[in-house]
Every structure is written in structure tokens, then in C-alpha cells.
């Protein structure tokens, strides 16, 4: 085997070291660094191209290799990586001749730049014999390769005098003495195209395909997933990937809860947006039971999880499952088998308070109660069907008071029911067709306070010259402008909606109308836009 002390250096390894030391000493603002990170696949490789995805650039996990970036901090990145190492789904490994630009090189009185001993860079289990060196390599194959490629590459591992000349003389091969040194010559490697990737920008296909030409080339395991099925439905990447998928913390994968924004969702009369069947997304061998579902969790501790995050439970469990278990049925091996009723449900006040609590989303009633359980007390279908808002007048025999159990705050009802009369005059003929009680004269005798306050203003035209109009006092129809406390209302997650509304298909045709605010005003007519 070779002795590293006899090797020569042909390329500027020292120059690379000095250049790296200069970069470390110069402030970042003088090296062209910007606040917004950008990965340019065609630019010179430096640490700014790596740190958006790799927080730890220390030891490298490559079988058979002992390597640490930390030991090479004074060497410029481009000294080893002449181009972006990631492309087409693979990571390009540094050729061994690049390592020999420094390893084993003697630099005058400074001595050896870096160790040239094999065992310092390779693990004991690593087979130092290249795969090309077949059993008969010492015969004709090595000679053919030497004639074709030259003998310099052989000298990375072999010494001419010790490893070659003796054998050549014995075999009477007239090739003359072999050189005793390896000349470090690094062949230029062409760079790839310049593609800019912005890790802090909106996620798009261009950020992924350079490194991942096949987005669905994933190792089967926990999930069955295909990007193609989602791209065909024109979903934007950021709908599932709100941030760049790679970061210093690792790969950011969408959690299961984000999948349920579509899977299992009933879109009014259009039906289910995507299947919620487990086997559609998980292979048969996958254990569907989460690791935290211990016996103690099932028999009681799940209450804390449910109170903290009811949506987590609802991903897998329907209300029927919860109701059956709480009623004492053995729906699972660890089910208690006895009636389980929440403590607050035993309080007499709960019957009067549970309607507003349901409307405000407190307690997530739907996780345990379904239509059947609600109908034991309510005559109105509960929870309401998905298309309930189209015509939700109480059926014959059901008093309007049945609605008041939940809808005690009438602002939302009034906003919708009065949306068509925002610009109407506050006069008797516009109100009494719906509110018969407002016919009463004098208006001060009307028992309903809200009706009375409006009715006393019916005749202001006599003194004012014109009647009031509704929008002059009402920001919305829940309370007057002077009394209302303006606050943001809970909005919709429009990312899914805009996947169709205002979006174009691959043929550049509009999928569904009403882009942007036009979609909002279809329902929210009091937005003033």
C-alpha cells in the first residue's frame, strides 16, 4: 500500500484553505448574504445553501466512512462540493480523488496537510478493495483499464515500486518502472441549471422537483399517499404544506388533523370531499391504535386529552362510538362496561346552559351526541343537516321556542334574516308583515323591548322629513352601532374553497366562479364590499 509522504500536490489545496479563512473573517453583509435565505442550485456551494435544511452539519452518516464537516471548517465548501450535491432524488458523493487534494499531501516544511492513512477515514468493516477489482484483476483487466484511463488513478492506493514493479518484472511485462506518486488532478464537473428555491416563500412545485423528480417515490410504511391524486384536483401545495417542508428541525410533514380538512368532510349537497376510510391511507399491516392509547388512557385518562383537543379524538372516533361506551356497551376490550356521565351533566343548570355552550363550541357535544341522542329531548333535527340553512323553518307542530334553546344569542339569526332590508326604511309597512306585534299602538305598550324601540321611530318622518334606514344604526342586526363591541368573528378556512373557486384547471379554464371577495359576499352580504 502507498506511503502518503511520497505524494505531490498539483491543485491549490492551500488556496482553498486561505479562501475559506477569509470568508470566516469577513462580515456576512460583505459576502452578499441577505436576510431572506435562497438556495441557488447553480451558485457556488457555501454554508448558506445548506443551513436552511441542515441544522447539524457535523458528522455524516455514510456507511464505511468516518467524516465530519466540523473538521473541515477552514476548507471552503466549494473546495469539495463543486456543485449542488442534491439532484434528481439522490445525493452526490464526493469522489475519492477530491479527498486526495489534501489528504496525504506534503506541503513543504508544514508537513502533511491531512492524514493519508486509510483507517483514519474508513471504518474497520469497510472493504478497501474497489468493486471493479475482480478476482482476476491483477491479470489483464487492470492492464486494460490502465491503458484506457492511465495509471495515475492507481497511485491513489498503490506505490509503483512496492506494489507494481516487482510483479511486472516477474511477469516480464515491458512497461518500465511505475511512478511512486499520485498527482492530484481533479476533473471539472459541470454545474446544474440555476434554480432558485426560497425556503421562506410560498411552497410550490418548483421548490421540490429539482431534488425530488418523483414526489411519490416514498418508502411504503405508515401511509399510502399520492401527490398526483391531489394535484389532479388542483389543490395548491401550500394547502397541505403551509411552510417549506425541510428545516433545521427536520422534515415538516403534514399532521393527520390537516388531512381531515378534506377527508370525511361533507360539502353540503356535493357529498364527501374525500374518503375517511382508514385503509384508503394506511396499509393493512399498520397498527391503527396510537401508542398513547394505554388501558389507563381508555378507561379514564382520555378525558384530559378530549378536553384539551376534541378534534384529535374525532379524527378516528364517531359520536356513536363515544355514546355506546359511555352508556356501558363493550365497544372495545378496555371499555369500562358501565354508564359514564360527565359531572357537569348531572347539574340541573346544565339543561339550560348546554344550548349556548354547544353554539360556542364548548365541550364538543358532537363527539358524544348524535342526532338520535338529541332527539330524545329536541323535536328539531339535531345536529342540523349540512343543508339545513336552505330552509330551516320549524316543521309543523314544532314551536319556534325550540330554536331558542341553542340560539339564545339572536345576532347571527338577525344578520341573515334582515340582510335583504339593510337599506330599507324603518316604517310600519316594512316591519309588521313579519312582526305582527309591532302593529300595536302606542308602540310603548309593546312588551318586546326590541320591537318597542324600533316601533317608536316609525313616525320620525313627520319631524325629520324622512324615515330612518336600518344601516344608519346597525353595523349588523345583532345590536345598535353605539352598543356593539366590534370584534373579529371566526372565519372560514378558505384555502380549500379557493382550490376551485377562481382557480384554473390545466386547460386554463375556470373551475368555479367567484374568486376572492366575490365568494365571501355570496353569503356575507353585510360586509360592505
Image (tube, rainbow, N blue to C red):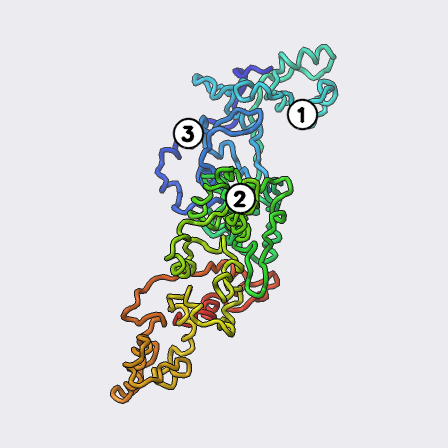
Label 3, on which residue? 18
The x and y percentages for residue 166 are 67, 11
Q: Secondary structure at mark 1?
A: loop
What number of labels is visible? 3
Label 2, on which residue? 337
Q: CA distance from mark 1 to mark 2?
A: 65 Å
Q: CA distance from mark 1 to mark 3?
A: 36 Å
> Which quadrant does the C terminus fall into?
bottom left
Q: Residue at x 45, y 70 (%)?
A: 521
Q: Residue at x 56, y 15 (%)?
A: 3
Above or below, 72 against 4 in this view is: below
Query: Residue 153 falls in which quadrant of the image?
Result: top right
Q: What numbered label is drawn on residue 131? A: 1
Q: What numbered label is drawn on residue 432? A: none
State which tag comes first along the sequence, 1 or 2: 1
The x and y percentages for residue 147 are 70, 25
> Which quadrant does the N terminus fall into?
top right
Amino acid at each position: 500500500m502507498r506511503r502518503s509522504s511520497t505524494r505531490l500536490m498539483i491543485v491549490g489545496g492551500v488556496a482553498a484553505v486561505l479562501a475559506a479563512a477569509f470568508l470566516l473573517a469577513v462580515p456576512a453583509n460583505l459576502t452578499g448574504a441577505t436576510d431572506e435565505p435562497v438556495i441557488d442550485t447553480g451558485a457556488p456551494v457555501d454554508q448558506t445553501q445548506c443551513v436552511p435544511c441542515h441544522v447539524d452539519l457535523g458528522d455524516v452518516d455514510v456507511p464505511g466512512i468516518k467524516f465530519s464537516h466540523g473538521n473541515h471548517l477552514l476548507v471552503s465548501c466549494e473546495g469539495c462540493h463543486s456543485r449542488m450535491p442534491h439532484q434528481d432524488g439522490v445525493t452526490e458523493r464526493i469522489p475519492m480523488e477530491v479527498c486526495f487534494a489534501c489528504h496525504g499531501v506534503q506541503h513543504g516544511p508544514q508537513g502533511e496537510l491531512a492524514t493519508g492513512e486509510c483507517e483514519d477515514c474508513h471504518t474497520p468493516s469497510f472493504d478497501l478493495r474497489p468493486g471493479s477489482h475482480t478476482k482476476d484483476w491483477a491479470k489483464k483487466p487492470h492492464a486494460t483499464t490502465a491503458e484506457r484511463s492511465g495509471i495515475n488513478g492507481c497511485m491513489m492506493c498503490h506505490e509503483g515500486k512496492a506494489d507494481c514493479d516487482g510483479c511486472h518484472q516477474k511477469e516480464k511485462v515491458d512497461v518500465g518502472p511505475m511512478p511512486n506518486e499520485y498527482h492530484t488532478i481533479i476533473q471539472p464537473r459541470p454545474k446544474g441549471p440555476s434554480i432558485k428555491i426560497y425556503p421562506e416563500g410560498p411552497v410550490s412545485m418548483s421548490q421540490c422537483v429539482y431534488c425530488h423528480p418523483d414526489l411519490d417515490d416514498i418508502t411504503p410504511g405508515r401511509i399510502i399517499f399520492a401527490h398526483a391524486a391531489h394535484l389532479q384536483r388542483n389543490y395548491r401545495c401550500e394547502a397541505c404544506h403551509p411552510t417549506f417542508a425541510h428545516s433545521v428541525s427536520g422534515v415538516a410533514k403534514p399532521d393527520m388533523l390537516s388531512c381531515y380538512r378534506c377527508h370525511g368532510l361533507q360539502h353540503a349537497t356535493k357529498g364527501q370531499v374525500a374518503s375517511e376510510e382508514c385503509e384508503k391511507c394506511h396499509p393493512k399491516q399498520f397498527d391503527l391504535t396510537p401508542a398513547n392509547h394505554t388501558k389507563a388512557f381508555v378507561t379514564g385518562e382520555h378525558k384530559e386529552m378530549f378536553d384539551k383537543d376534541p378534534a384529535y379524538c374525532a379524527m378516528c372516533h364517531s359520536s356513536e362510538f363515544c355514546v355506546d361506551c359511555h352508556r356501558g356497551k363493550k365497544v372495545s376490550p378496555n371499555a369500562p362496561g358501565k354508564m359514564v356521565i360527565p359531572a357537569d351533566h348531572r347539574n340541573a343548570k346544565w339543561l339550560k346552559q348546554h344550548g349556548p355552550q354547544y353554539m360556542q363550541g364548548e365541550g364538543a357535544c358532537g363527539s358524544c351526541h348524535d342526532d338520535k341522542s338529541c332527539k330524545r329531548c329536541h323535536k328539531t333535527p339535531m345536529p342540523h343537516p349540512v343543508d339545513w340553512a336552505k330552509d330551516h323553518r320549524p316543521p309543523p307542530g314544532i314551536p319556534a321556542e325550540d330554536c331558542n334553546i341553542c340560539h339564545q344569542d339572536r345576532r347571527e339569526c338577525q344578520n341573515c334574516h334582515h340582510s335583504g332590508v339593510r337599506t330599507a326604511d324603518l316604517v310600519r309597512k316594512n316591519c309588521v308583515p313579519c312582526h305582527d306585534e309591532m302593529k300595536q299602538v302606542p308602540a310603548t305598550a309593546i312588551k318586546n323591548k326590541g320591537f318597542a324601540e324600533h316601533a317608536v321611530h316609525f313616525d320620525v318622518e313627520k319631524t325629520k322629513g324622512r324615515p330612518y334606514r336600518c344601516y344608519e344604526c346597525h353595523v349588523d342586526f345583532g345590536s345598535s352601532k353605539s352598543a356593539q363591541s366590534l370584534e373579529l368573528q371566526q372565519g372560514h378556512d378558505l384555502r380549500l374553497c379557493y382550490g376551485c373557486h377562481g382557480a384554473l384547471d390545466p386547460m386554463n379554464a375556470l373551475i368555479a366562479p367567484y374568486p376572492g371577495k366575490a365568494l365571501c359576499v355570496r353569503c356575507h352580504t353585510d360586509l360592505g364590499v
